[in-house]
Amino acid sequence: QSALTQPPSASGSPGQSVTISCTGTSGDVGGYNYVSWYQQHAGTAPKLMIYEVSQRPSGVPDRFSGSKSGNTASLTVSGLQAEDEAEYFCSSYAGSDNYVFGSGTKVTVL
Amino acid sequence: QVQLQESGPGLVRPSQTLSLTCSVSGASISSHSYYWTWIRQPAGKGVEWIGRIHSSGDTTYKTSLKSRVTISLDTSSNHFSLRLTSVTAADTAVYYCAREPVTRINWFDPWGQGTLVTVSS
């Protein structure tokens, strides 16, 4: 059982948007603005896509955006492209040098 | 370009010690700017942060694993290592190493490809 809850799957057609939720508690997602999102294609290393809830590292397309409301963070992928088909998992700081992660959401581009 | 690569035995017997190495290229693990981190993902389950080490030698471990985990640095070989003692089937997972800037929180990048470790007799 993961500390953060994500839906197992999400899908959308090319050009559409898909939003993935990540639900935690006031001790992690709700308590800190240190939520990150990672993209992982099958057999490859995870890649940081969003940090500090809504910030994009250099090189990440602006089609990827993050937000947070209460204990739930969200990742939105706009203008879906075939290359966006991957597993996405969230992570949150949980205080006292502790980090918690979600179990991942498989995004399928129809 | 910074790259990390995990290596080590793919099979460990129950009650034995799991030992993995993360080789770093494109950056020096002696840099004071980064933590070097181990993370794992059991099959079908969520990712779990294990712990980290700084070039100063300071370590931080997940509370529930603290009694069994040791992370160390080998600056001469530019790699860092993970030791997990008294393993059980629950320790079967893909193990990743990653880098985290000291100026950031929850910012792991890059990651290694991961290595599967199975605990079984």
Image (cartoon, coloured by chain):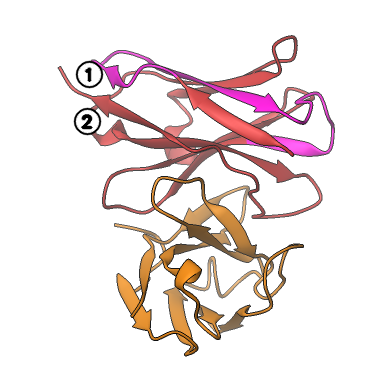
Chain colours: A orange, B red
Q: Looking at the image, which is closer to me, A17 or A70? A: A17
Q: Which residue is mark 1?
A: B14
Q: Secondary structure at mark 1?
A: loop
Residue B68, horizontal then vertical, whole percent? 43, 24
Residue B55 location, x and y as percent?
77, 26
> Element type at marker 2?
helix
Residue B38 visible in this rendered orientation of the protein: yes
**Residue drawn at (26%, 16%) of the image:** B15
Please state if A51 lies on the left or on the right of A23 as rendered: right
Mark 2 lies on residue: B89
Mark 2–mark 1 contact, CB under 8 Å?
yes
Residue B61 visible in image: no
Residue closest to the eye, B111 or A26: B111
The quarter of the rendered structure image containing the N terminus of chain B is top right
Which quarter of the figure is the C terminus of chain B placed in? Answer: top left
Q: Is residue B40 above or below residue B72?
A: below
Subunit of label 2: B
Q: Is residue B47 left or right of residue B89?
A: right
Image quarter of residue B93: top left
Three-letter code for the amino acid on which mark 2 is drawn: Ala
Farthest right residue?
A: B32
Q: Which residue is rendered at x = 22% and y = 30% of the image?
A: B89
Residue B21 belongs to the span the image colors magenta:
yes
Q: Chain of mark 1?
A: B
Q: Earlier in the sequence, mark 2 or mark 1?
A: 1
Q: Give the extent of the magenta segment.
A: B8-36
